[in-house]
Amino acid sequence: MRIIFMGTPDFAIPTLDALVEAGHQIVAVFSQPPRPAGRGKADRPSPVHARAEALGLRVRTPVSLRGEGEVAAISALQADVAVVAAYGLILPKAVLARPRLGCLNVHGSLLPRWRGAAPVQRAILAGDDETGVMIMQMEAGLDTGPVRAAWRTPIANKTAGDLTEELAQAGAKLMVEVLADIESFPPEPQPEEGITYAAKIEKAESRLDFSRTAIEVERQVRAFNPMPGAWFSLGGERIKILAADILSESGPAGTITDEDFRIACANGSIRPTLVQRAGKGAMATVDMLRGFSIAPGTSVDPA
């Protein structure tokens, strides 16, 4: 097929690669414009932009798709279908209608649960037992379109990074299967019940709240690993927790209750197993404690 690909972060790269490997003709890749990044704050292309250039593909980075010029440019590509994976820009109706078969989206949740920007993190934070990836026929609403195919996986103790990579690989494979015989995957409307919205993650949410239960705090740790990283402040220093165990012992919430860095929560406690101090790399908690002893009874800084 003649395919327009639209994506921006690492999540979208496996789908782009899979489409190329399947022999489809990628007539253009659309990605969000380069953004300032790194210490020098120089403009850096998105992961999809960089990957597309490495593959020798034509890349376009419009700020918006609402202008007549962009709609005309997309129409001129005469694509059979547009494949969208975490693009980050709204596709107006005029764009949705241009490809012969419309636009297909790789979405990282079991719709209609977790429509929106951050389905992986929200599923972990909510304590969902499972999630998945769906191939959705796009329409004007926010992730409201009918679904052509789905794949499910248990969440268990996976981090957002683990789950995102798993869903990215599964979504790529599923998209190739759908495009190979699209008539065998008719679009089915989403249920009208069970709709939830996955709001964009705000930085303030990554600060650990020990007034919650240990189960909820540990979910924060996994949901914000690797980015932005769940953290708390101790003596004015920000410390990230990248992995933690849940323990049954309780104590005053936010208090370090033993020499092994157990932190009490509203119900139960957590023991960080992988941490990162400001300006340092990730390390096992036992290694941090060798040069950074914390007396039992110490409380974390209040929010």
Image: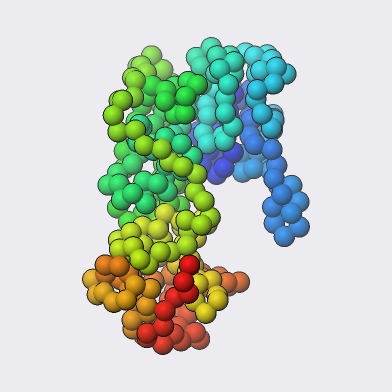
Q: Height in image: 264 above or below 57? A: below
Q: Which of 137 and 183 lies nearest the eye of the viewer?
A: 137
Left or right for 123, reference 45: left
Q: Height in image: 229 above or below 278? A: above
Residue 266 location (% of width, % of height)? 30, 67
Residue 271 in which image quadrant: bottom left
Left or right for 41, reference 302: right
Residue 138 location (% of width, % of height)? 47, 22
Q: Height in image: 170 above or below 247? A: above
Q: Which of 254 and 134 lies nearest the eye of the viewer?
A: 254
Look at 48% across and 20% down and name the residue there.
Answer: 139
Left or right for 49, reference 182: right
Residue 249 in which image quadrant: bottom left
Q: How is the image coloured?
A: rainbow
Residue 141 location (% of width, % of height)? 47, 24
| Figure label count | 0
Q: Is residue 64 visible?
A: yes
Look at 46% across and 80% down and name the residue there.
Answer: 287
Q: Which of 160 and 258 lies nearest the eye of the viewer?
A: 258
Left or right for 80, reference 69: left
Q: Quadrant of the N terminus?
A: top right
Look at 41% across and 61% down and name the residue there.
Answer: 221
Q: Is residue 181 visible?
A: no
Residue 280 location (% of width, % of height)? 58, 72
Look at 36% across and 50% down and name the residue there.
Answer: 124
Residue farthest front in this picture: 302
